[in-house]
Image (cartoon, rainbow, N blue to C red):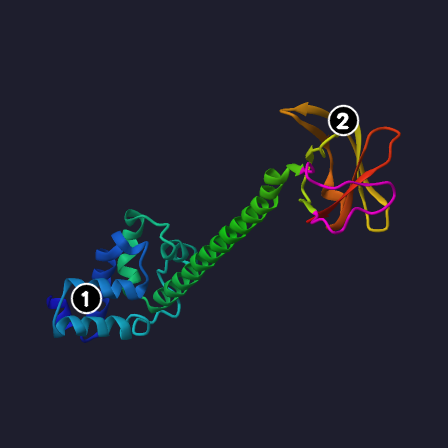
Amino acid sequence: MNVCRAASDVTNHACVSRNLFGYTWAVFQDCTCDELISLSSKINSGEADQRLLDILRQGLAKEFPNPERIGCPGSALLNRIARGRVSLTELEPWIEHLGSCSPCFQEFTQFRKQAAMRRRRIQVWLAAAAVVVFAVTGWLWMRTRPSVQTASVTLDLRERSVSRGQNPADTAQPPLEIPHGAKHLTIEMPIGSKEGSYDVALFSDTGDEVLRAAGTAQLENHVVILRADVDVAGVRPGPYSLGLRQPDLEWTRFPVHVF
């Protein structure tokens, strides 16, 4: 380019800058000033092109003083241009001025930096929001998933020895496990148990009753099954005795562990 080879004084500086502004505005909305200079290097090559880049870097920001800001478009328009909010048609009357006014170029460059910082902050906020949403979703899923899986619990007492009365359950037997989120118990009763209504309770190590429910036992496939709705959520995890009895009879106790 002849402009590149002759660009050694202020007049040629302005010409080069105007050409650069006019050519690059189609992609300008997504480019920084350094990216515009990089774009020109793709079009040209050789020593003349390097001279052009040097002129743009060293001259445009300082060598076109306009202390009284004569003919400047104003900060509002420069800000819109820097943020890519101005069309090429609206920008065209200002291309020559923007290529020959250092104060406008400096203000424009500052606006571009601010816009880039805002975009980075928005990206960080969006990433942080996505992490928070993901974490909350995972927490809720983990919180509700066990409840779905353990809402109904089956306890097999068919081979368990029976401990009656006020005495604690036989601690030699391994305790049955009851999840903290259990809502319904299906109890396979010890051999010889009768059908009918039953009281169901949990007793602490000291014999205090911490939970009471009622259910009905029925014969199903040669096994007496007792079903009872319970709410173990209010019971602290730990060892307990599961108490079963028919009305007016003594408690039958079995060791359990709430976890």
Q: Earlier in the sequence, mark 2 or mark 1?
A: 1
Q: Nearer the viewer, residue 76 or 230?
A: 230
Q: Does the stretch in magenta take in 210?
A: no
CA–CA distance in space, label 2 to label 1: 94 Å
Is most of the magenta stretch helix, strand or loop? loop
Q: Is residue 50 left or right of residue 257?
A: left
Q: List x then y, in percent, for residue 57.
A: 27, 72
What residue is rendered at 29% in x and 70% in y?
60
Q: List x then y, in percent, for residue 145.
A: 58, 42
Q: Nearer the viewer, residue 155 or 22?
A: 155
What residue is rendered at 37% in x and 57% in y?
82
User: Which stretch is magenta?
Assistant: 156-175
Q: Is residue 193 left or right of residue 122?
A: right
The amino acid on which the numbered mark 2 sits, given as a three-letter code, is Lys
Q: Does the stretch in magenta take in 170?
A: yes
Q: List x then y, in percent, for residue 211.
A: 80, 40
The local crowd at label 1, few if under 14, some if 14 to 19, many if 20 or more residues have their Cα within 10 Å, is some
Identify the residue under disc 1: 41
Identify the residue under disc 2: 194
Circle 1 SS class: helix
Q: Nearer the viewer, residue 20 or 133?
A: 133
The amino acid on which the numbered mark 1 sits, given as a three-letter code, is Ser
On the image, which quarter does residue 219 sit in? top right
In the displayed structure, would residue 17 be above or below residue 257? below
